[in-house]
Image (spheres, rainbow, N blue to C red):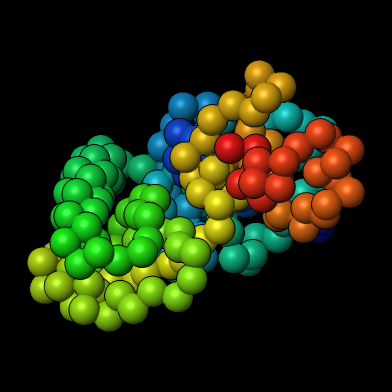
Amino acid sequence: MLPRTPRVVSIKLTEVGRVHHVVDGREHGRPPAPGDRVIVEVDGGQAVGTVVRGIPQLVGRRRTTPDGPHRMVRLASRGDIVTRLKQERREQDAYRVALLKIRERGLAMKLVRVEQLFDGSRLLFYFTAEGRVDFRELVRELAAEFHARIEMRQIGPRDEAKSIGGYGTCGRPLCCTTFLTSFEPVSIKMAKNQNLTGRFCFRGGQ
């Protein structure tokens, strides 16, 4: 008896961002349709994603296994969706509070976004900065405010563009939010060939 071919599902974890291809880890149940909300296993825990229409030629190239780190667990219930809506409001509150505290302390960092894990155990704060930032006191205050484990994650300008989204000079959505999975170093030669200034180049087209 031939092993069951894993069913690959195309999802987006946020409105702005690239499409992820994950294995449907269920043994039974109807195939998820575009627009369905689903629970998926991702790095660090579970998340709610939205099924999108995949491109068969691209989906077929993905090497996926049923026991891989990224997989669909189940269709999201009404309760899951309500929980996620509450989490989104909490993320907005956490963003406002953290932004206020950063300004009060004069920390040389730019808050990009806040993300709460679906199990509610952690709040992740993504930020950019030119150098090292001592945010220990900020973490303690945020932990006391939201009664959750706080993680501060420093990202680069191109990761910031990937999180926020936007359009490039070509008029199309940024490559990093649509299909790029990693960032290659930008050389001076590449910048010259595209007639870009150094600042424009290293900010990922922003």
Residue 205 horizontal side relative to residue 88, left or right: right
Pick out the residue farthest to the top: 171
Report the residue at 81% width, 43% height from top. Answer: 191
Q: Is residue 117 visible?
A: no
Q: Work out whether residue 3 or residue 143 is closer to the camera in this orientation and state it.
A: 143
Q: Work out whether residue 3 or residue 135 is closer to the camera in this orientation and state it.
A: 135
Residue 138 horizontal side relative to residue 76, left or right: left
Pick out the residue farthest to the left: 145
Residue 2 horizontal side relative to residue 145, left or right: right
Quarter of the image with the C terminus in it: top right
The image quadrant of residue 101 is bottom left
Check the image and report above or below for 23 versus 125. Answer: above
Report the residue at 22% width, 58% height from top. Answer: 103
* x then y, percent, for residue 132: 45, 75
Quarter of the image with the N terminus in it: bottom right
Report the residue at 83% width, 52% height from top. Answer: 188
Q: Is residue 183 visible?
A: yes
* x then y, percent, for residue 110: 38, 55
* x then y, percent, for residue 196: 75, 37
Q: Work out whether residue 99 or residue 62 is closer to the camera in this orientation and state it.
A: 99
Check the image and report above or below for 155 versus 52. Answer: below
* x then y, percent, for residue 42: 51, 60
Query: How many circles with numbers are drawn on the protein?
Result: 0
The image quadrant of residue 105 is bottom left
Check the image and report above or below for 43 versus 198. Answer: below
Report the residue at 23% width, 45% height from top. Answer: 92
